[in-house]
Amino acid sequence: MASAAEQLASNLSFSTFSKAEELKKRIWFTLGALIVYRLGTYIKLPGINPDAYSRAFEQQSQGVLGLVDVFAGGAIERLAIFALGIMPYISASIIIQLMTSVVPTLEQLKKEGEQGRKVINQYTRYGTVILATLQAYGIAVGLESGDGIVTDPGWFFRLTAVVTLVGGTMFLMWLGEQITARGVGNGISLIIFAGIVAALPGAIFQLLEQGRQGVISTPTLILVLLVAIAILMLIVFVERAQRRLLIQYPKRQVGNQLFQGESSHLPLKLNTAGVIPAIFASSLLLLPLTAAGFSGSETMPAWLSYITGLLGRGQPLYLIMYGGLIAFFAFFYTAIVFNPKDTADNLKSHGGFIPGIRPGERTAEYIDYVLTRITVAGAIYLVFVCIIPEVFMSNVGISAFLGGTSMLIMVSVTMDTISQVQSHLLAHQYEGLVKKSKLRGGKSGRGGRRRR
């Protein structure tokens, strides 16, 4: 038997959407905010020689800059005011999450509900300012060391660059929070999603142009497109996959009435860590390559040159370390965001239990056992999705915007946004049913009074 929510979901149609005025306002607000973000990625940082910077960026595009530029929507390539993107905020959020498991004060705040969440969010904002300031100053100093990139080097340029870049990041953070509150979907994720999607047509056109010019053979081009479609289908399948643990609630008596015990499910996602392991692993491995590029091949130490050669994109050692780091961060981040002991304590406090498992510590051990097993499968999936496009990127020369990390972000954000749209439509349909029932009740009541 289908539940009431499932029956309503099956009846959703375009007419339901056309009547949901609140949802349409939220969608228009989201689109407007994303347009503002995209316009900001074309406003260049003042005091820069565009030609000199383009040449320098071309040399570093295979390092960390190329990876971060994917998440910045091309703002780093154009050196726009949004060049830092939203990554300092994401980094600060991850650091705060890690600290909540170590610092007792933050752990206590996390358990205080909405008020504690507000305090943690404020700490995250402070951390964003600190990280963005350090990164912006590093960028300003790095630009000054380039050949003719900065037209007037000095402290005035550094100050203006730091203020502009930090201001851009804080504006994006505020814009993301506004999208989350007044729009549809997670604002921070949608900002990254918009940057990737905006560059996707250009990346596909570049791939097709390479095929037309003979740089890539036609069979290879067809193989790349088929692999991309297969990976997208795999991502959609796995991101929806869950391991549901049966939760049983005992019978309860309220007054003279005895209510039967209810049952529900505890959903455990196959990929609990999301896209974070791929981002962390890529950043760590590409740091030596970027450092080597900034130092220059003439002044590079022999040991750094040797490491750079071994860790070149597509090299066997790079792929092995990349896969190993993804697997490590998949387990590490899952342990941070999901605490089996807290889940078991919440179930016990509400009277819920897993059939055949004693509440409390045994339940926590069982949840941890199941979570570890499915995380193994999730880690293998992440490694496969990220390694296969990496092989094509290094051997065929496709754009980073067609990489596994980009596909993960696009699919995950799209599925999350669609689910939120469906939730708004269901809420609108529920409201319509409630209003109709009230109207019918009022009419029958008035009719009954007339008959009396």
Image: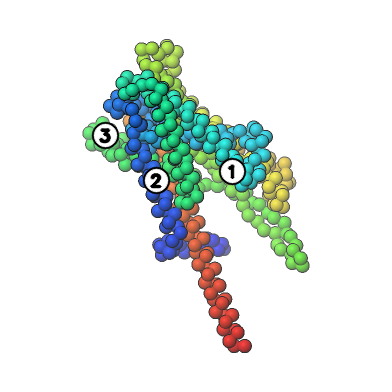
CB of mark 3 within 8 Å of CB of mark 2?
no
- Going by the numbered disc 3, the residue's amino acid type is Gln
Visible residue check, residue 215: yes
Q: Report crowding for label 2: few under 14, some 14 to 19, many 20 or more residues within 10 A (C-alpha).
A: many
Q: Report crowding for label 1: few under 14, some 14 to 19, many 20 or more residues within 10 A (C-alpha).
A: some
Q: Which of 334 and 220 is in front in this view?
A: 334
Q: Nearer the viewer, mark 1 or mark 3?
A: 1
CB of mark 1 within 8 Å of CB of mark 3?
no
Q: Residue, x 55% and y 63% (percent of image)?
A: 4
The span from disc 3 to disc 2 (Cα, nearest Å) is 31 Å
Whether residue 122 is situated above or below residue 427 in the rendered picture? above
Q: Nearer the viewer, mark 3 or mark 2?
A: 2
Measuring from the top left, give residue 352's x and y in whole percent. Answer: 69, 52
The residue tagged 2 is 34
Whether residue 422 is situated above or below residue 307 in the rendered picture? below
Say the numbered circle drawn on residue 118. 1
Q: Residue, x 60% and y 43% (percent of image)?
A: 117
Element carrying mark 3 = helix
Disc tally is: 3
Lower sequence index among marks 2 and 1? 2
Element carrying mark 2 = helix
Q: Nearer the viewer, residue 43 or 255?
A: 43
Q: Which of 38 and 57 is in front in this view?
A: 38
The span from disc 1 to disc 3 (Cα, nearest Å) is 50 Å
- Going by the numbered disc 1, the residue's amino acid type is Lys
